[in-house]
Amino acid sequence: MKKLAIIGFGPRGLHALEMLFLELSKKNKSDIEVHIFENEDELGAGQVWNTKQSAVNWTNITIRALKNLEGRPEINFDNLKIPAFPSYINSLSAEEKEALKHLPDQFPPRRDIGKYLKERAQSIVEILQKHNLVKMHKTFVTQIKCVDTIFELVGLTGDIYKSDEILLTIGHQPTKLSEDLTSFEVDSLESNKTFFSETYPIYKIIKSDATSTAKNIAIRGFGLAMIEAIRALTVEKGGRFEILNKDTFASKFITSENVAEKIIPYSLDGLPMVPKPLNKEIDHQFNPSKKQKERFKSVVLKYANGKLKAENANFLKELFAEIGVAVYNTLENKIECSDSSENLIKTLLMWFENQKHKHECLLNTERNTISLLTNYVSMAANEIEISLDFCVGQVIRHLQPTLYAAFSHAAVEDSLFADVIQFDEMMKRYSYGPPIESMQQLIALHEAQILDFRFVNDPKITTHTDYWTFEKGDTRLNCEVVINSVLSAPKLLEVTTPLIMNLLNDELLQPAHSKLGIETNSDATIVLDDENKEIPIAVLGRLAKGSVIGVDAILECFGPRIKDWAKGFVNRL
């Protein structure tokens, strides 16, 4: 009997188990025992989708887009039946489905999706446990040793478990603190200042006395996690948002005594996230045609399989610019200019290199932050003329699934893959943008004189006994609390998790590139420099960023790469 260890059982681990038994049923193979290692209480949800987390943690994907989170078919395996499980959309009540037809796009709290994932996991794990096909181990795995052809997994308490193959689906892992974060950490140890090195789990921020009593709070980062940290510092501290316009979510903030007087976000460039369009009708105008998507896929595949050569991500930028301008020209409500399509493409290519590049069709990023926010929100609601950058950002979002599928495991130089990932990360300010409602909350907090954008662009920071001083020009503010909201990149060589560090030390893992994650084959098994050394360890998810692209979205947890792994595993039986 072959033993498989699945380490980590969030959404990816759940879907891996589903796809495994679906493939086993197709090949009529049954001589297997699966051991699942997960320290979280809620199987299938993991930390990100935990059902006990605060409602201030929202998804940045619409329920409309979650239609692509497909259900599980019925699986008949070795005289037992694993029942089908509905898609996310079909799991909603009739009343909820009907309401969605008449509302702007909805972005549910993460705990709502967690409830779905938890129930989906229970529906398969409980059956497999009863038939002794799955064994659960609530523990951290700290080390994996390869003894002859068998793996020995060492738990936190020293217990040893044996397995023939391993699948790692452990999600985001902590990394070494950067120089500025280390400085914050050290400064806060022996003083009255408070530093949070991570935003999550967010209950630590919510429950902290320091965040209830601090006069001023700074947040490092200007992305999605920053928005959730701000809701934790306001809504969870007794404040509330009163929606003034149900169509656009324009709001007013009513504060409380536990809300800080000032909250200041900051980042290296000070550029804010850009909201997604308000509803399906507005969003549809940015969706490239079927023909454009097919051409995009065809060209990307040619670069991915080596038929066309590239030294950097310029080929991708040129494709995005070409399609972006074509879509922009079809918009009825856009900033008009006399430039030809060819010149607009050149403008976009310059803007890709420098987002402060100026053009009459681009929103000037040198405007003050509140002006940028209000303009982005108005564009997302189709209330003002659409800028070229807003348009191309949404076009890229619609093309991302095609890019992720076509370019993952590309037969290209590591440096090219790294450059493509870097460009994709840069454009996430647009393509992974938050709901309009989140941005309206930021605007409301600014109008309430709580959210202060004067320090948003790379301020000078000095430390004192009981506070940090933030300076920008002639403006200063002393903050007693600093929260880091920047999610560390999945750089394998900087991960501090004992399991990963031990695998690296034992040369059972290696990065695809010094700045990236683990190199894997298309079936998720790891790649090593020694071609004669085959290690039956597979990796799915964030740590494989370097072989795959687009690992962070919930839909990717239920994507084709999980099925590819399952097919590969079953073929090796």
Image (spheres, rainbow, N blue to C red):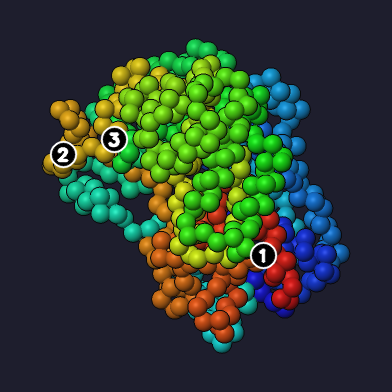
Image depth: mark 2 or mark 1 in front: 1
Q: Given the image, on which type of amino acid does mark 1 rest?
A: Trp
Q: How many other residues sit within 10 Å of disc 3, few (<14), some (14-19) or many (≥20)?
A: some
Q: Position of residue 429 (x, y in %)?
A: 46, 38
The residue most toward the left is 465
Evaluate if marks 3 and 2 touch, with contact meaning CB atoms under 8 Å apart. Answer: no
Q: How many other residues sit within 10 Å of disc 2, few (<14), some (14-19) or many (≥20)?
A: some
Viewer-side residue, 362 vs 396? 362
Q: Identify the mark at residue 466; answer none if there is no mark.
A: 2
Name the N-terminal-most of marks 3 and 1.
3
Element at label 2: loop
Q: Position of residue 21 (x, y in %)?
A: 75, 62
Which residue is denoted by mark 3 in the rendering?
Answer: 457
Q: CA distance from mark 3 to mark 1?
A: 43 Å
Q: Which residue appears at 34% of the width and 43% of the height? A: 484
The residue most toward the top is 244
Q: Identify the mark at residue 502; answer none if there is no mark.
A: none
